[in-house]
């Protein structure tokens, strides 16, 4: 066999082998940054013991690095079995409101950087006026929220007024997926993502 023929056959085998091997490409259904950060906020909310409202917050710096996470709960060291979780009671002291720390406060207090100035906060609910004050004092420049269901209450009206005065941007998050499922078993099945998004009608 001449070297020319041998070379042709070797080249053909190499080509055939390349065609038979599966192409290695990146996943196309990965979470984009905004959905990832809001999903982290919602996952954090699962730590909340509040029976009626589980809220999470995630603070992100301009480099897309998470610098703080929090969820609503009782202050550190306070026995949450001894404090009330009710939304309504004849005496306000028997409700959760005088005691619970909101997710925004906890995210700011739990920061893992020197400060959160210039950062963005992703949060499930539009912040109340007390959290708005904390956000302003912390130097956060943008708030991205999913729900504004208490829009017409005085607390939320005050929040918007405060944000507008200092130029903090706030906008509603529009998810591409209404549901994200975490599957712990997927790590044992190559090629299957551990988190998948499913689109559902609202």
Image: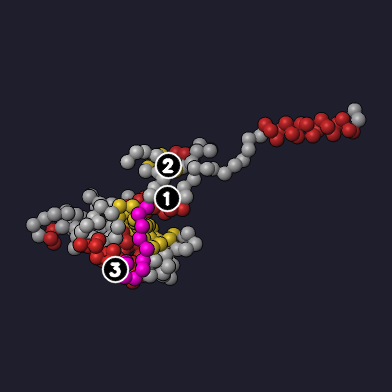
Label 1 vs label 2: CA separation? 10 Å
**Judging from the image, what secondary structure is the residue with disc 1 in?**
helix
Q: On the image, numbered disc 3 is attached to which residue? A: 162
Label 3 vs label 2: CA separation? 35 Å
Q: On the image, numbered disc 1 is attached to which residue? A: 35
Residue at (40%, 62%) from the top-left corner? Answer: 120
> Can residue 202 be spotted in the picture?
yes
Q: On the image, numbered disc 2 is attached to which residue? A: 197
Q: Determine contact: label 1, label 2, CB under 8 Å.
A: yes
With respect to residue 52, does 15 lie above or below? above
User: Which residue of the protein is positioned furthest toward the top in this rendering?
Assistant: 1
Q: Quadrant of residue 144?
A: bottom left
Q: Residue 78 location, x and y as percent?
A: 24, 62
Q: Which residues are magenta?
A: 163-173
Query: Is 167 part of what is drawn in magenta?
Result: yes
Nearer to us: label 3 or label 2: 3
Camera-side residue of 12 and 85: 12
**Judging from the image, what secondary structure is the residue with disc 2 in?**
strand
Q: What is the quadrant of the C terminus in the image?
A: top left
Q: Residue 110 location, x and y as percent?
A: 37, 64
Q: Is residue 37 left or right of residue 133?
A: right
Residue at (44%, 38%) from the top-left corner? Answer: 185
- Whichever of labels 3 and 2 marks the residue nearer the N terminus, that label is 3
Residue at (46%, 42%) from the top-left corner? Answer: 194
Q: Is residue 130 left or right of residue 41?
A: left
């Amino acid at each position: 066999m001449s070297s020319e023929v041998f070379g042709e056959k070797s080249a053909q085998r190499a080509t055939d082998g390349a065609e038979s091997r599966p192409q290695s490409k990146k996943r196309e259904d990965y979470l984009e940054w905004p959905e990832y950060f809001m999903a982290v906020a919602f996952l954090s909310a699962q730590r909340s013991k509040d029976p009626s409202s589980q809220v999470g917050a995630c603070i992100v710096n301009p480099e897309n690095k998470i610098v703080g996470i929090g969820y609503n709960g009782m202050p550190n060291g306070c026995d949450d079995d001894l404090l009330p979780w009710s939304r309504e009671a004849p005496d306000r002291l028997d409700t959760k409101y005088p005691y619970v720390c909101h997710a925004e406060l906890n995210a700011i207090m739990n920061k893992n950087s020197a400060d959160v100035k210039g950062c963005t906060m992703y949060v499930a609910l539009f912040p109340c006026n007390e959290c708005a004050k904390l956000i302003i004092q912390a130097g956060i420049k943008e708030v991205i929220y999913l729900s504004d269901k208490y829009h017409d209450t005085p607390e939320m009206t005050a929040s918007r007024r405060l944000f507008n005065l200092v130029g903090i941007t706030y906008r509603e998050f529009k998810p591409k997926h209404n549901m994200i499922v975490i599957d712990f078993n997927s790590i044992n099945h190559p090629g299957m993502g551990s988190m998948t998004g499913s689109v559902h009608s609202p």
